[in-house]
């Protein structure tokens, strides 16, 4: 495959171990997409079980999104928002504010930057309102908020973040429940109360992934837990930041996870599905109360000194506007409970003795893999990774987080394809682990 050999010579892939990538048998070169399908250069078709990294919610080559981007190309591909504006950004910001109840939109280009913007805004707002002692942030254990230095500082997944610790600021680390169980959440909240009592006066903001910590392997917490945590932050005088990069635009069954809770965020971070997975765009939404802390005479320099070249890029905003149109016109959110129930049925139908737990919320699913005795596989076995690669032989693209195989299909994937997707994962489990897993001489699963 000439494309792969050229790739191996020059490309550096994200979250991908170089030696392993260059020797993997199931590497694929994706050339086209059709709806919920990906098609490689050999003409083989694969269900997009990751929504192309959790962002392609409406399917590939959607005619309305394609047309919107083409039409924008006939006008202008890019113009800066530094000291200028353009109609698409104005309209999209208006619509986001109407949908969320927030007041202001700051555009950037990725989930990481959306969070980074929220951190800097919250910090600067505290400084400019006179709370100069508020220089820290609180985040949950096992958090993932992106890969820029500020967002990594909030992160709590050692595999991703430990190597960078000398570069980072120290967050106040709050315990997070592994699953939404009352006793476990109560214990976490009790410890959170202690930490807010100790550090609340120095916190600029609490930053959370609302209802589910995706990169932690779909660790869930309840609406009641999130409301209680937000209430503690507010009582301490800290802002509340919801990182909805993964959960926004329908992934959890409502347009935003924030729609399910009582505590309203001061900042809302959006990216991924904001353009239907077409083009890079992110948005940090906040309130007029925050915005007003940045007003003042020019010599006071209360400006938010942050920006991106492609802030509010017209092509990306055109795709984002079309995405909102399709969500509304097709009544997508109303249809999500039925599709989510079908995903749950498809997950439940997967049979294998190494499935330790099935995790599911909305259109997010995960199969946690363990040995038949319940013990974890050794890290060097790379079981989850091998299962994800093996699924490609059966016509599905999925990804793993450790030994949790993740299923994040497009929100438009229907029942037949959902069951085809999970059957492909089941076949991959048998390929990697056998019907009744056994270990080879090294003690690793065959």
Image (tube, rainbow, N blue to C red):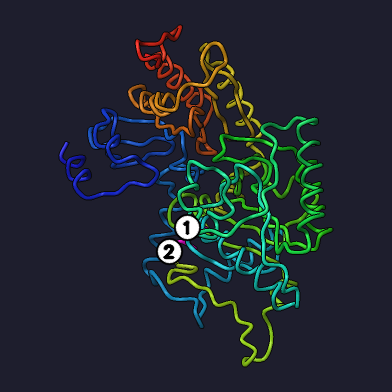
In the rendered view, would you say 436 is above or below 22?
A: above
Asked if residue 310 lies in the magenta stretch, the reply is no
> Residue 15 is drawn in which quadrant?
top left
Where residue 435 sits: x, y (%)? 44, 8
Disc 2 on helix, strand or loop? helix
Which numbered circle lies on residue 347? none
Q: Which residue is mark 2?
A: 315
In the rendered view, would you say 299 is above or below 409?
A: below
Main SS of the magenta segment? Answer: helix
> Does residue 360 appear to the left or right of 19 in the view shown?
right
In the rendered view, would you say 6 is above or below 114?
A: above
Q: Which residue is mark 1?
A: 319
Name which residue lies at 80% across and 30% down: 183
Where residue 139 sits: x, y (%)? 66, 51
Where residue 402 sits: x, y (%)? 48, 32
> Residue 60 is drawn in which quadrant?
top left
In the foreground, 140 or 195? 195
Where residue 117 sits: x, y (%)? 57, 65
In the rendered view, would you say 48 is above or below 258?
A: above
**Which residues are the magenta region?**
316-320
> Does residue 133 appear to the left or right of 43 in the view shown?
right
> Does residue 403 appear to the left or right of 7 in the view shown?
right
In the foreground, 205 or 355? 205
Name which residue lies at 70% across and 78% down: 128
Distance CA(mark 2)–CA(mark 1) = 6 Å
In which quadrant of the rendered image does the N terminus lie?
top left
In the foreground, 141 or 301? 141
Name which residue lies at 68% across and 53% down: 172
């Amino acid at each position: 495959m000439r494309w792969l050999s050229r790739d191996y010579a020059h490309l550096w892939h994200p979250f991908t171990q170089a030696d392993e990538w260059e020797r993997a048998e199931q590497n694929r070169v994706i050339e086209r997409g059709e709806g919920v399908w990906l098609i490689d250069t050999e003409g083989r078709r694969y269900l997009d079980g990751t929504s192309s990294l959790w962002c392609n919610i409406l399917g590939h080559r959607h005619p309305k999104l394609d047309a919107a981007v083409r039409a924008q190309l006939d006008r202008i591909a890019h113009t800066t928002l530094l000291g200028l504006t353009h109609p698409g950004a104005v309209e999209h910001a208006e619509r986001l504010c109407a949908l969320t109840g927030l007041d202001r939109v700051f555009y950037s280009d990725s989930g990481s930057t959306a969070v980074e913007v929220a951190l800097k805004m919250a910090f600067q707002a505290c400084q400019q309102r006179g709370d100069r002692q508020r220089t820290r942030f609180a985040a949950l254990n096992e958090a993932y908020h992106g890969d820029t230095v500020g967002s990594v500082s909030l992160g709590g997944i050692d595999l991703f973040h430990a190597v960078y610790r000398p570069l980072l600021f120290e967050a106040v680390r709050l315990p997070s429940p592994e699953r939404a169980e009352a006793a476990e959440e109560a214990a976490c909240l009790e410890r959170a109360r202690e930490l807010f009592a100790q550090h609340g006066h120095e916190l600029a903001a609490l930053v959370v992934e609302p209802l589910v910590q995706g990169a932690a392997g779909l660790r869930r917490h309840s609406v009641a837990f999130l409301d209680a945590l937000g209430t503690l932050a507010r009582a301490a005088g800290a802002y509340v930041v919801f990182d909805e990069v993964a959960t926004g635009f329908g992934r959890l069954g409502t347009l935003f996870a924030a729609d399910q809770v009582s505590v309203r965020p001061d900042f809302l971070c959006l990216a991924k599905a904001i353009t239907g997975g077409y083009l890079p765009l992110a948005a940090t939404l906040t309130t007029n109360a925050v915005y007003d802390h940045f007003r003042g005479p020019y010599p006071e320099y209360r400006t938010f000194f942050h920006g991106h070249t492609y802030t509010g890029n017209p092509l990306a905003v055109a795709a984002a506007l079309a995405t909102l149109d399709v969500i509304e016109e097709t009544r997508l959110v109303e249809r999500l409970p039925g599709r989510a129930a079908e995903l749950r049925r498809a997950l439940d139908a997967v049979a294998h003795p190494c499935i330790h737990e099935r995790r599911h919320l909305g259109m997010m699913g995960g199969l946690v893999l363990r040995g038949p005795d319940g013990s974890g596989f050794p890290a060097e076995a790379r079981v989850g990774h091998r299962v994800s690669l093996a699924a490609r032989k059966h016509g599905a693209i999925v990804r793993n987080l450790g030994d949790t195989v993740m299923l994040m299909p497009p929100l438009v994937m229907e029942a037949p394809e959902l069951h085809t997707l999970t059957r492909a994962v089941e076949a991959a489990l048998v390929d990697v682990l056998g019907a009744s897993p056994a270990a080879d001489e090294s003690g690793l699963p065959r």
